[in-house]
Image (tube, grey):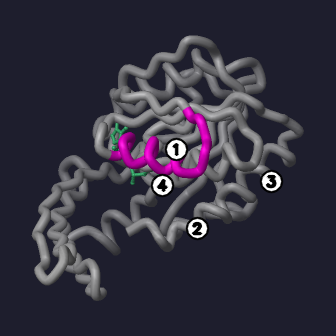
Amino acid sequence: MMEDYGYERWVEYIASVFKRLGVHPTSMVDIACGTGNMTIPLVKSGYEMIGIDSSEDMLYVAKEKAFSMGLSIPFIHQDIRNLSLHRPVDAIICMCDGFNYILSDQDLLSVFSKIYALLNDKGILLFDISSYYKLRNILGNNLMADASEDISLIWFNTFDDKDDICRMDLTFFVKKESAYKRFDETHYQRAYRLNDIKNFLLEVGFTKIEVFSPFTFESPKVKDNRWVFIAQKL
Ligand SMILES: C[S@@+](CC[C@H](N)C(=O)[O-])C[C@H]1O[C@@H](n2cnc3c(N)ncnc32)[C@H](O)[C@@H]1O
């Protein structure tokens, strides 16, 4: 499902963000790291990484992938709403919707505040989220399907305008020998307004905040699928 996200492109983009800001982070934490699709290429690029996620299943896959590549990466089971680290770090990233899974303003503000406290001076918080437009107008109240030989997916979404939450009911059929096994999952993603996120970042202490269209240093647009936020602790 994540094939189109462009992880290698993100690795290059993250390096270009650091260069632009004149920082050289060594220690970095990938929060809501999933199966390590971003953590692992960043380790290969020379960063000292920790991966954090609340799903043991995702972390199991991340650990297996790292092990099979001969990489030793600490993957920690933690809910980022209770984020804690042994020592401050130079950068924290949260890629591909991690913060859309934080459903309330209060929780997001609290996560940002914890992140701010855990960053070294000049430390960077970099994340991308699905835009309000994408969750409300493209995914929301829509039915999608995708079929290939090994896996088929039916994806039914409803958007609640009262709380700006997109509920995604996913049904997978995964090929197992001569039959298909069915799996069901429900995801909830919160659609945030760009300015609300900016204000939360300001509220917890970040003074330098930039927002871009993905893979660019151009101003974000309302109809972008994603927005990239870069906040620095100065
Ligand atoms: C769409 S995946 C993105 C994974 C990864 N960042 C990537 O780019 O491949 C979202 C991830 O957020 C994790 N997640 C959701 N809520 C979380 C929370 N409160 N604390 C930690 N991880 C969370 C999920 O378990 C899932 O692995």
State which quadrant residue 212 falls in.
Answer: bottom right
> Mark 2 or 4, which is nearer the eye?
2
Q: What secondary structure is marked by label 1?
A: helix
Whole-percent x and y of residue 64? 44, 46
Q: What secondary structure is marked by label 3?
A: helix
| 91 falls in the magenta region | no
The vertical placement of 169 against 126, above or below, is below
Instruction: Identify the mark nearer the N-term, 2 or 1.
Output: 2
Distance from disc 4 to disc 1, alpha carbons, whole Å, reads 23 Å
Residue 96 shows which numbered tag?
4
Question: Amino acid type of disc 1?
Answer: Phe
Question: Amino acid type of disc 2?
Answer: Gly
Q: Nearer the viewer, residue 172 or 131?
A: 172
> Mark 2 or 1, which is nearer the eye?
1
Instruction: Identify the mark nearer the N-term, 2 or 4.
Output: 2
Which residue does the numbered mark 3 point to in the structure image?
A: 16
| 62 falls in the magenta region | yes
Question: Amino acid type of disc 3?
Answer: Ser
Q: What secondary structure is marked by label 2?
A: loop
Q: Residues within 10 Å of mark 2 (few under 14, many from 20)?
A: few
Q: Which residues are magenta?
A: 58-73
Distance from disc 2 to disc 4, alpha carbons, whole Å, reads 10 Å
